[in-house]
Image (cartoon, rainbow, N blue to C red):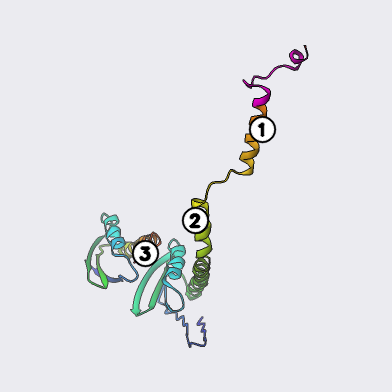
Amino acid sequence: MPKNELDFSHSLYNQHALDETKVAYSELLDVALSHDENNSRATFETDDENGTLLVDAFCNHALFLTIQQFRDGDSA
Amino acid sequence: MSPQTDSSESTTVELTYNIDERQVSFDVHEDVFVLDAIYGAAYLFVDRCWLFLARPADKVVRVHLKTKEEADEAALDELAGEFANELLNQAMRVRIGESTATLREYTMARAFFTTPVQSSIDALLAELDAEELEEDDLEISVPWEETGA
């Protein structure tokens, strides 16, 4: 099963937004999140041709939630 | 498109497109466009294309835009150009928001914390009610024939 890794900088992506996105996509996408001081590393396990699409959608959702939380006063 | 802006502080903005299939990437410097403006532009594009932001260096945001459908180089160039335009638009919004913040705070404070003054319409309505009550205590209308009898 192919793995795909992405690093989300905490200066751009809210950690809570990433966690929320993981929960939202839990039934669609197998993703493991590991957090360190500056980044969150997402490891995606994709098993079909829709995998790339779902990873892209995951990134959009995480960014969307981050912007919403940024505007609500919770900094990224 | 690779616009450059030189100011007295030698601040240079370089937008470089790394066109790879359906994806275009470019760097945005936070010295020029604040994160709020970058977020504002990204928010408007989140339903149009796939976005991913990365931090290649301090105060630099790498924006990755990927189309949802097949696109040639011209389409990607256009997408990146539209994003850059929106970035300028959002930067202006942020700057205007900051410059008018005091005025907005003053207006809100005055609206919420000053003594309520009865509006002119309310005053007129109250005056009319008072006049009607003087003429008829129970506010029961009387046909004109009976009043003339």
Q: Residue at x 63, y 22 (%)?
A: B139
Q: Residue at x 49, y 51 (%)?
A: B112
Q: Residue at x 57, y 46 (%)?
A: B117
Q: Tell me the mark number nearer the camera, choosing from 1 and 3.
A: 1
Q: Nearer the viewer, residue A6 or B101?
A: B101
Look at the image and tell me whether residue B70 can be seen: no
Res B50 → quadrant: bottom left
Look at the image and tell me whether residue B134 can be seen: yes
The residue identified by callout 3 is A63
Res A40 → quadrant: bottom left
Residue A4 position in % (x across, y down): 26, 70
Give the magenta part as a residue range.
B133-148
Q: Nearer the viewer, residue B135 or B86?
A: B135
Answer whether labels 1 and 3 touch (C-beta < 8 Å): no
Mark 2 residue type: Ala
Q: Residue at x 66, y 27 (%)?
A: B132
Label of residue B128 in the image? 1
Q: CA distance from mark 2 to mark 3?
A: 34 Å
| Same subunit, tags 2 and 3 | no
Query: In the rendered image, which quarter contains the C terminus of chain B?
Result: top right
Tell me the chain of label 1: B
Q: Earlier in the sequence, mark 1 or mark 2?
A: 2
Residue B84 position in % (x across, y down): 50, 73
Residue A2 position in % (x across, y down): 23, 68
Q: Nearer the viewer, residue B145 or A58?
A: B145
Mark 1 residue type: Leu
Tell me the chain of label 3: A
